[in-house]
């Protein structure tokens, strides 16, 4: 067993453009209170990207003056899809376009470079674990939660009894690719939304930036043909929709209403499946103006169906510290692993 006060874990959140790192001591205190970013270099292939991860590890140790020999384990998270062991799926993960990423063992490669055990989670699971620990604190091991995190795609995580559920192939908690009922969500004549994964009608096909680009905005522009965004390239226009929604634009609010309804339906399924204590919403909406953020979360709540007993105790809230949630969740996962060794 590790001696109290003698060790730390490092968490590294690997993204499409940047890595962010943190350090967690054995008492559960984060020693980095700000973003500690470096370029991730993932589009340049595994060799440069693994070196970039090592640089992130070195950066946070230098920031905290923690010697390398005190690191018991490193937590790593990346965008999915990947196996529970950290092997990227065929074709590489979403943000990894370089062909050498296909079926690449990113966890094992980093562990070999560092000579320190590396514990892997996907980024949605890592953020979900951090949110769970912040919300439930000392009671985290006795509680459950689900998280839906909306970005370019729709990530998420399921935590039960304080532990991330990964599943046999590492695909548990892929809530964005769960099919949801669309009756009452889609307008009459609105095309069945498609997802990059090849499915139709999953949560990500609605609740994601990709969903806005592929499905929602093209439809709603047919309803509002004179809208200012009608003359803007669709990819750029999709990124501008949230700003319009914050200003009360009717069409933009319809788009986000559909996204909130989709998340509510994911939570409705989760309520029947794992019956969690807490339901977390994460993504760009957290960074939005407070009046719009509150409206969005209220719309999620209105579209989440609970039994009476669940409604009396259910807590739907926001993922805290989202920019740092991945790295911090990864550090927590590494700490939990180290404590069992």
Image (cartoon, rainbow, N blue to C red):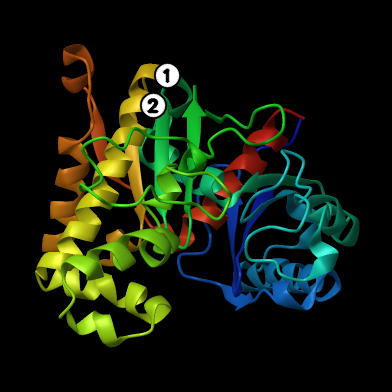
Q: Which residue is rendered at x = 41% and y = 40% of the image?
A: 147
Q: CA distance from mark 1 to mark 2?
A: 5 Å
Q: Nearer the viewer, residue 266 or 143?
A: 266
CB-based contact (under 8 Å), mark 1 and mark 2: yes
Label 2 secondary element: helix
Q: Position of residue 43 (x, y in %)?
A: 71, 75
Asked whether, in this view, residue 217 is left or right of residue 121, the answer is left
Q: Nearer the viewer, residue 10 or 64?
A: 10
| Residue under numbered circle 2 | 270
Residue 243, compared with residue 12, is above or below; it is below
Q: Which residue is rendered at x = 35% and y = 72% of the image?
A: 238
Residue 175, compared with residue 115, is above or below; it is above
Q: Position of residue 318 (x, y in %)?
A: 29, 48
Taking the image as drawn, is residue 289 in sight?
no
Taking the image as drawn, is residue 285 in sight?
yes
- Please give the label number shown on residue 206: none
Q: Position of residue 27 (x, y in %)?
A: 54, 42
| Residue under numbered circle 1 | 273
């Amino acid at each position: 067993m590790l001696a109290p006060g003698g060790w730390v874990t490092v968490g590294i959140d690997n993204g499409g453009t940047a890595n962010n790192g943190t350090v967690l001591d054995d008492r559960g205190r984060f020693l980095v209170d700000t973003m500690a970013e470096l370029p991730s270099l993932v589009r340049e292939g595994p060799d440069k990207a693994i070196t970039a991860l090592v640089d992130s590890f070195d950066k946070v140790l230098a920031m905290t003056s923690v010697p390398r020999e005190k690191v018991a384990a490193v937590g790593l998270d990346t965008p999915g899809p990947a196996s529970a062991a950290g092997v990227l799926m065929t074709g590489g993960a979403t943000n990894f376009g370089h062909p050498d990423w296909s079926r690449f063992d990113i966890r094992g490669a980093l562990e070999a470079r560092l000579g320190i055990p590396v514990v892997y989670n996907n980024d949605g699971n890592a953020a979900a674990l951090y949110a769970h620990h912040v919300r439930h604190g000392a009671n985290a091991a006795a509680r459950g939660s689900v998280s839906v995190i909306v970005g370019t795609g729709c990530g998420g995580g399921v935590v039960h009894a304080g532990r991330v559920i990964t599943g046999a192939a590492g695909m548990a908690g892929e809530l964005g690719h769960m099919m949801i009922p669309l009756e009452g969500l889609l307008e009459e004549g609105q095309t069945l939304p498609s997802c990059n994964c090849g499915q139709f009608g999953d949560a990500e096909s609605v609740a994601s930036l990709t969903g806005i680009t592929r499905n929602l905005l093209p439809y709603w522009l047919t309803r509002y043909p004179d809208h200012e965004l009608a003359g803007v390239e669709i990819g750029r226009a999709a990124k501008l929709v949230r700003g319009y929604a914050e200003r009360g634009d009717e069409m933009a609010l319809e788009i986000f209403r559909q996204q909130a309804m989709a998340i509510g339906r994911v939570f409705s399924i989760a309520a029947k499946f794992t019956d969690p204590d807490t339901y977390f919403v994460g993504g760009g909406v957290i960074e939005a103006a407070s009046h719009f953020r509150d409206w969005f979360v209220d719309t999620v709540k209105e579209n989440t169906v609970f039994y009476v007993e669940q409604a009396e105790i259910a807590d739907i809230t926001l993922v805290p510290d989202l920019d740092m949630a991945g790295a911090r969740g990864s550090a927590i996962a590494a700490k939990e692993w180290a404590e069992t060794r």
